[in-house]
Amino acid sequence: MRGVGPTFAAMLLACVVPQLEAQPEISWPDLIVRKHYEGFAAPVQITHAGDNRIFVVELGGKIRLIKDGTIQSEPFLDVSGRISTGGERGLLGLAFPVDHAETGRFYLNYTNQSGATVIARYGITPNPDIGDFQSEEIVLEQPQPFSNHNGVRLPLVTTGTSTWDWEMAALPVIP
């Protein structure tokens, strides 16, 4: 079998590869990066509850709260006794549904002590800046075959009903 000759290959490339036109030079703005907060232990997520509070999820099991520009001394929630850590395991995600202000509910994704992925629903205490450790309701517990790649994203999307659709990598859809 004969190979493709250089002339034919050049003609083929001329047809397939679009001609690149000179692009105007882009003037990018200077960026300044400033450290606003420090002292977090292995932060894996930063999120909010639809208000002025910022929540920092730490792999080791704590959710730290930044309120009015100050890191609060007491964590929003500490589930370090419920999780396994190491590598890609630990407290991996936090999501607030759109009705959090009314219901006080929120959801966590973590790796439990047996290595399974857990999605759990929690509520808050009478102080909305403190999650209720005792209120845990396990929504899903999924055994994991390996200790890595256990993380999932927990964005909640309303479907117009009382149920929630969850978009999750490597986990089934929860109706």
Image (cartoon, helix red, strand yellow):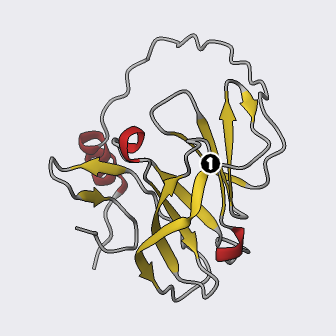
**Vertical order, 106 against 120 (above or below):** above
Question: Residue beneath label 1, please?
Answer: 130
Split into 4 quadrants, where in the image is the N terminus? bottom left
Q: Amino acid at mark 1?
A: Ile
> What residue is rendered at 44% in x and 17% in y?
23
Residue 20: image x %, image y %?
37, 27
SS class of the residue under badge 1? loop
In which quarter of the view is residue 140 placed? Answer: bottom left
Left or right: 20 in relation to 92:
left
Q: Is residue 83 visible?
A: no
> What residue is rendered at 55% in x and 27% in y?
52
Residue 38: image x %, image y %?
82, 38
How packed mark 1 is, by other alpha carbons closer than 10 Å (few <14, some 14-19, many 20 or more), is some
Furthest-left residue in this view? 160
Left or right: 3 in relation to 141:
left
**Vertical order, 66 against 163 (above or below):** above
Furthest-front residue in this view? 126
> What residue is rendered at 80% in x and 42% in y?
73
Towards the viewer: 92 or 9: 92
Q: Is residue 99 visible?
A: yes
Residue 117: image x %, image y %?
51, 77
> What residue is rendered at 68% in x and 35% in y?
66
Towards the viewer: 74 or 86: 74
**Vertical order, 41 against 168 (above or below):** above
